[in-house]
Image (tube, rainbow, N blue to C red):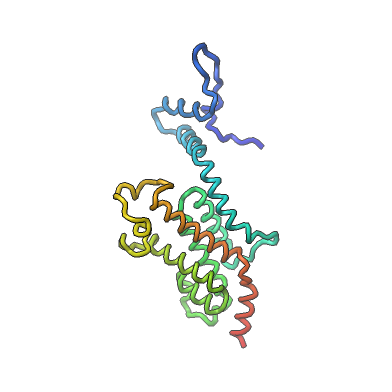
């Protein structure tokens, strides 16, 4: 199976030998040289730019995938995972992992948070008769409290879910910059211009990465972990029905 990864308009050009002129042997060199001659942005120039960006970030993306797999491996099993939150929970979880690999840490946090919401809501649906009429509008915090009360999750996972819920609040809802657990507050004080720089080594960006990884770890444990949710749901429901 062949793939046309490099931009064809550049990489398919033959390199002819000329005296005293060295050929551009690397695809990246040829793409850069070609881009310098282009004055109008086209699909070809965008493809070429993406090709260069992919090459520059490939190793760091691979390193982040290793982080994700190190979280997932302890829960790997051939028979798969009973997902109570429906296919959307799986899609959200996968989007969280892909976003993290691409260093889109806020998207990873939000998707992992939503995956946890759907999974817990799917579990609580078994107890709908004992829940308030509008329970399906609950956010993650209330879902966690009720799931914990019913014995569906253990205390360690409960505390992680609460933390993810709080981290999401300061990112997705407007909070003053000096809110105690805001990203800016935890990262320390920076000049305004540095807050918008997309730097892996900045404290601001580093805090977002830590938050996103915690959310992925927590959602992995909830969706794929050995929580015995089927057993816990069955046991709790029998106890409630007596």
The residue drawn where x is 54% and y is 27% is 26
Q: Residue at horizontal 41%, vertical 33%?
A: 41
**Where is residue 107 shown, x and y percent of the image?**
46, 55
Q: Position of residue 83 (x, y in %)?
A: 60, 65
At x 48%, y 56%, the residue is 108
- Asked which quadrant contains residue 237, the reply is bottom right
Position of the N terminus, as image quadrant, is: top right
Quadrant assignment for the C terminus: bottom right
Q: Quadrant of residue 220?
A: bottom right
User: What residue is rendered at 52% in x and 23% in y?
Assistant: 24
Instruction: In the rendered view, tell whether residue 85 sits above or below residue 47.
Output: below
The picture places residue 49, in percent across and down from the top left corner, at 46, 35
Q: Nearer the viewer, residue 64 or 123?
A: 64
Q: Quick check: 207 above or below 131?
A: above
Is 58 above or below relative to 67? above
Q: Nearer the viewer, residue 183 or 50?
A: 183
* Residue found farthest to the top: 19
Where is residue 74 drawn, in percent x and y? 63, 60
Q: How many marks?
A: 0
Which residue occupies the extreme right position in the image? 78
Q: Nearer the viewer, residue 180 or 102?
A: 180
Furthest residue to the bottom?
A: 242
């Amino acid at each position: 199976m062949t793939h046309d990864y490099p931009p064809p308009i550049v990489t398919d050009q033959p390199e002819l030998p000329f005296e005293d002129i060295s050929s551009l042997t690397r695809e990246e060199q040829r793409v850069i040289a070609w881009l310098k001659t282009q004055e109008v942005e086209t699909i070809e120039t965008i493809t070429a730019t993406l090709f260069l960006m992919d090459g520059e970030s490939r190793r760091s993306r691979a390193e982040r995938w290793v982080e994700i797999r190190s979280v997932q491996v302890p829960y790997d099993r051939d028979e798969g995972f009973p997902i109570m939150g429906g296919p959307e929970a799986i899609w959200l979880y996968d989007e969280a992992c892909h976003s993290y690999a691409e260093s889109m840490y806020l998207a990873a946090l939000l998707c992992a948070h939503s995956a946890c919401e759907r999974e817990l809501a799917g579990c609580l649906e078994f107890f709908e008769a004992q829940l308030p009429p509008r329970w399906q509008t609950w956010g993650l915090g209330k879902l966690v409290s009720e799931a914990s009360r019913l014995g569906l999750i253990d205390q360690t996972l409960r505390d992680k879910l609460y933390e993810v819920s709080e981290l999401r609040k300061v990112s997705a809802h407007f909070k003053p910059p000096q809110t105690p657990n805001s990203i800016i507050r935890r990262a320390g004080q920076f000049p305004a211009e540095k807050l918008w720089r997309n730097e892996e080594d900045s404290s601001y960006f580093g805090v977002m990465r830590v938050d996103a990884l915690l959310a992925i770890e927590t959602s992995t444990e909830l969706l794929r972990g050995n929580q015995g949710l089927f057993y816990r749901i069955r046991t709790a429901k029998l106890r409630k029905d007596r």
